[in-house]
Image (cartoon, coloured by chain):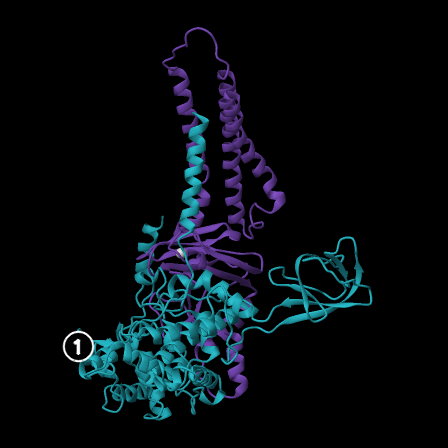
Amino acid sequence: MKPRFVLLSAASLLTAVIAGCGDFKSEFVLNKTTDELIPPAKEIVETELHENFGTPEELVAWLKFPIDYGDEESVTVNVVGFDEGAKGVVRVNSEDELEVDFEGSVLRIGNETEHKISSFDPESGTLHVTPPIEAKLTPEDSVTIVLKQKGWLLKRGRNLYMKHCVHCHGVSGDGNGPTAQYLNPLPRDYRQGKFKFTSTISTEKAAHRDFRRTLYEGIQGTSMPSFKLKLIGDDMDAVIAYVLFLSSRGEYEIRLGGELKVLGGGKDDLEQRLRNEEGLTRAKAIEEFESQEEVSEGLPELSDSVATILAEDWARADNPDVEVWPKTPRPEPTAESIARGRALFISKDAKCSDCHGMQGYGNGSQTEAYQQLPGSTLTYDKPGLYDDWGEPIQPRNLHTGIYRGGRRPIDLYRRIYAGIKGAVMPGFGTSLTDEQIWDLVNYVLSLPYENSWHGDMSAEKTVAEHTVK
Amino acid sequence: MRKFWCLFFMFWPVLAIWLCWVSPANGWWFPSIAPWELGQQIDDLFYLLLIITTVVFIGTQFALGYVLWKGSDVKPGRAWFSHGSHNLEVIWTILPAIILLFISLYQMDVLARIRVMSKFPEQASRDPIAEVTARQFEWRIRYPAPGKKLLAQPQPDDLYTVNDLHVPVGQPVMIRLRSDDVQHSFGLPHLRLMQDAVPGLVIPVWFRSNAVGKFEIVCKELCGWGHYKMQGELTVELEEDYEAYLKALQEKMNDDGYPADAENAVAQSDEE
Ligand SMILES: [Cu+2]
């Protein structure tokens, strides 16, 4: 074998490895609602998004939102020794238990100069910092070690999201990651700010605890697994912070675009005006749009008001007043209670059977009817139900024993009380009494066992014995 | 250059042996001593195989190195042509065959005790402790209600959890292993146990841990892009702790959110 051949194959292998890793770009992409705006309006949205949320690499934390981005955590320590020769080495009092994480820890002297900590020896309290320290430190001085920098939770959330979540939920949280196309149901697109399984009333967003629960338990029946062992300690809060960040960013984009559309920034609206109004030119219409108070000097105000409303919506979700709790305990699932639930299920008041079917198999008449497109008199091309993301959905077959939002009685109570947000399932909290909801819960929980047989496993045992590898 | 290739090819077997040699001291070997006798017997089998293969490996590599080294000098004259040796071939066919036959017979007992259900401890096979369903990418677990038997069909009072398997210490326990989607493999590296989960089959798996503690459950079959996420936890605990765990789980499963005092709410969100 010639050495040149070896070199060549090694070189080609190396190029393949490098090229294989080079494709991935983590960039936020624009929503299609923004693409439907005229160029100056689109530019406004793009600029505002960039200024207020940054890029995946350079995140901007908009403090208006009720998101825990992570506060600075620091300790003040006494200088024990400072080597003037090697200005990058400081010895500090190591009696305080310091846990220096090299990723983001810095040494701060006074209020201004910050030095990156490149290594730390907890035994001797020796810190190596860059750049070298110009000032002369004496043992009377104290310095601040910033253990966690402001925004650390969001950054950690970003890193964890990029590792565990991005494959499905996408860089922008649009539910369009590389593996999304293989999944049914599709991964959640966060950009509408809607999350299905919550403990809040039907008009409110998801609370922090709802994200925790979803991450902890997973969503059975979907591709969302449990992360209870993968995200421990602060990690789960970090991921939630980042999901809230992506969701706020996405919804802000949609809402700001909506405001601009009202001000004449919509592509379709412009085309229609050009057709209908005589003497109107494209340039004139665009100039008209741009000269409006709201999109020129008033733009910061417009942007701010959009964000304020959104931030208030999110803040309200964590208010204990909007959490759904039953006023009465769950009654025993007696035959009577189940029968009452059954009657209600097929009644005109609750109309559960319209979607879930007379027997609860998820095959009600609505699944075969043409549904109206939102905000339009037209209907969808295909019959069946659609969610707020425009995707076809199936009413749950209640016989499978799989409950996406949780199988505890309280989970089912909340599902019936507040509905499933973004899906067709409405909330019955105002139209049904507590007793009625509990009867429904009892009926629904009884459905998987309607035809159950209480057999022993003897028949199965023989099968298993033969088929074990 | 010829000598270089000889050294190059000899370097790898030496590295492999050196790595195996230093591994135990560096914690790159088995996670810990298996906390049950079958696990230890599996280790014994492993070491037996390791010794046999090491002897063969060193022998063949040594022979290879010797031939390479000898052949690196160009000798004058014509090459010697050989059509092989019938006797040698018979020897190196029969000898490995004997070794393989020995291994397969020798391990049969341990294999049967792990895999054949009629050899399972009766206590374990009579009352499976839980049903573990692998799915992309988590382990869904179904327990019977305390004091009840696990039945093949889900029952209204069954208890459900995810990635969290609890068993009592020192008792043989059996799980029913299933898969919801693709092929997975239920792996307990600390117990040296591993069993494929095959869609459509219910596979009984039994084990016992004589040590209390938390052990990792891993998926040992590359089952998709999120394979690494299939991490579960096996908690081996005292009988009373195990019963308390099931009780607490039952309480959680029956939670109807009443009364809704603030403490209740906080406790719930903390736990989750
Ligand atoms: Cu797997």
Residue A12 left/right relative to B31: left
Q: Identify the chain of the residue marked 1, using the numbered disc in the image.
A: A
Q: Looking at the image, is B181 positioned above or below residue A443?
A: above
Can residue A23 be seen in this snapshot? Answer: yes
Q: Nearer the viewer, residue A172 or A364?
A: A172
Residue situated in front as seen by the camera: B92 or A222:
A222
Residue A396 picture location, percent across and down = 28, 75
Q: Secondary structure at mark 1?
A: helix
Residue A450, above or below A437:
above
Chain A color in figure: cyan
Looking at the colours in the rendered structure, which chain would you say is drawn in purple? B
Can you tell which quarter of the image residue A214 is in? bottom left
Q: Which residue is mark 1?
A: A368
Image location of residue B90, percent across then percent down? 39, 20
Say few, some or many: other residues with alpha carbon within 10 Å of mark 1 (under 14 / 14 to 19 / 20 or more). Answer: few
* Quadrant of the image occupied by residue B230: bottom left
A282 relative to A22 in the view: left or right: left
* Residue at 67 percent of width and 70 percent of height: A74
Quadrant assignment for ligand 1? bottom left
Counting from the top left corner in percent of width and height, residue A40 is at 35, 75
